[in-house]
Amino acid sequence: MTTIENVLEALRQVEEPEFKHHLVKLNLVRNIRIFADKVTLELMLFNEDSPHRDQLIQEVEKVLKDIGVPKVEITVSILSEKERDALSARIRAEHQQKVRAKRAEGRTPLQAEQASSLTAQDSNTLFIAVASGKGGVGKSTVAVNLAVALAREGKRVGVIDADIYGFSVPDMMGIEERPAVVDKTIYPVERFGVKVISMGFFVEENAPVIWRGPMLGKMLRNFFQEVEWGKLDYVILDLPPGTGDVALDVHQMLPQSKELLVTTPHATAAFVAARAGAMALHTEHEILGVVENMAYYQCSDCGKRDYVFGEGGGEKLAEELQTDLLAQIPLGAPNNGDPSSPDFSPSVYDADTSVGKLYKELAQKVIERTSPVQSS
């Protein structure tokens, strides 16, 4: 009697020629159904013009008939772009893991861990914490668009969504897939040239995170030490608002981190943001500057600016913290077209838009202010 286990075991003999792994491992055989006189299944290909189409069909038919299946009916389907990208990333991750394992031979477990850690002593990665005094000022929007703008400038960039209670980065960037996990090593998701890790990847159905400080700190350490980031020039940390446990943990874990403060023009928002800036100064973290978000609303027809949240908050905050106002971002949202498009994201501005150009200027200022560190 033919069983699913028999069929899967037989299909493990069929190798996908390009990726050099069997069809079951790659999840390229789906919807297997067993009848008295036949087996039907769906064979997934990478594209319509796959040169291996006929070869794979013949091999699948052969191995199943070899175990006594009288008739095999195969439906051919094509993987979606997201499925292809995810599978390619997974295979690359496995290959990199094997390479690293060989390189790690002869080293102690501690040496191997330190060598792969983002916070290792020999790491040249620069951390930039994006902070705010209160929620609702667009801190995550600034963090995401700064990261993408830095990547567009040719930098290798990662984002850690450290706002563990209010994680939003995956949704803002239009990320739907989850990180690959190989031998307990996590591989970040890449989008718009930026590598991303977030608590949102590890929480089901947007469930609330009910954790205390020590557990949050442990999760952050996992993000730094157990994620395979590769070589990065910048890591943007999207901090939770205020000066709570997570922000304090980040300051303690990353004494070399620099800080970018986000506020709105409103006097109260700037006043509260000053506390986050004071915390950075108290822990001897350099403040790169201030970003004033929702600085004004600009009419799309006449170009007139309305300062709906007031004026001067960003300048006042920068003056109080003895730093510079680096950017004033207007109130608005990107128009990124069809939400079903693979390039859609709710919050990332295209490079050629007016706001995209403002983020480009912000990225260039950040690079200019950190270039001595980067070149050392």
Image (spheres, grey):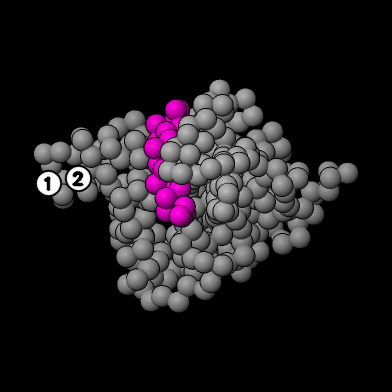
Q: Is residue 292 left or right of residue 15?
A: right
Q: Amino acid at mark 1?
A: Thr
Q: Is residue 49 visible?
A: yes
- Give above or below for 240 relative to 8: below
- Give above or below for 361 relative to 138: above
Tag 1 near tag 2, CB within 8 Å: yes
Q: Is residue 280 left or right of residue 135?
A: left
Q: Is residue 21 magenta?
A: yes
**Residue 339 pos. (x, y %):** 72, 49
**Residue 102 pos. (x, y %):** 21, 35
Q: Residue at x 83, y 48 (%)?
A: 299
Q: Nearer the viewer, residue 342 or 327?
A: 342
Q: Residue at x 30, y 40 (%)?
A: 97
Within the image, what quadrant is residue 134 found in? bottom right
Q: Nearer the viewer, residue 52 or 336?
A: 52
- Give above or below for 104 relative to 285: above
- Disc 1 is placed on an element classified as loop
Q: Magenta residues, as a range?
A: 1-25
Q: Nearer the viewer, residue 146 or 47?
A: 47
Image quarter where the N terminus lies is bottom left
- Give above or below for 224 relative to 45: below
Image quarter where the C terminus lies is top left
Residue 340, disc: none
Q: Which residue is mark 1?
A: 108
Q: Residue at x 70, y 43 (%)?
A: 341
Residue 112, disc: 2
**Residue 55 pos. (x, y %):** 51, 26
Q: Residue furthest top?
A: 51
Q: Is residue 183 magenta?
A: no
Q: Residues within 10 Å of mark 1 (few under 14, many from 20)?
A: few
**Residue 131 pos. (x, y %):** 49, 58
